[in-house]
Image: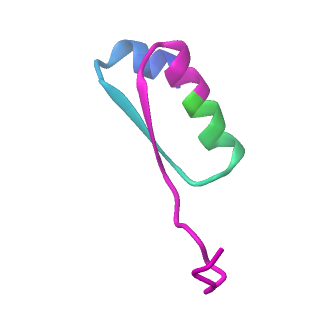
Amino acid sequence: FEKELMNNLTNLVLVVGDVTSTMACAIVAKKLWLKVVHVEAGIRSGDLTM
């Protein structure tokens, strides 16, 4: 992933979810001083007070 980012100009990296690969991509992006945008599905319990 790091090679791909270095070979392609970009301003930010969009990561989705909460798995290890999401964290790994975010770490690589920050190492290269890129902005990271994280998208998550949100609360799935149905309890909006959480």
How many numbered marks are there?
A: 0
Q: Residue furthest right?
A: 20
| Residue 16 place in picture, x, y as percent | 51, 51
Q: Quadrant of residue 42?
A: bottom right
Q: What is the span of residues highlighted in magenta in the rendered image?
A: 27-50
Say which residue appears at 56% left-offset and 31% top-offset: 26
| Residue 40 place in picture, x, y as percent | 52, 58
Q: Compared with residue 15, is residue 33 higher up or lower down, i.e. above or below?
A: above
> 8 or 49, which is in the foreground?
49
33 left or right of 10?
right
Say which residue appears at 36% left-offset and 29% top-offset: 12
Say which residue appears at 64% left-offset and 52% top-offset: 18
> 12 or 6, which is in the foreground?
12
| Residue 20 place in picture, x, y as percent | 71, 43
2 left or right of 14?
right
> 20 or 4, which is in the foreground?
20
Location of the C terminus by quadrant is bottom right
Q: Magenta stretch containing residue 36, yes or no? A: yes
Q: Compared with residue 23, is residue 18 higher up or lower down, i.e. above or below?
A: below
Say which residue appears at 62% left-offset and 79% top-offset: 49
Q: Residue furthest front?
A: 49
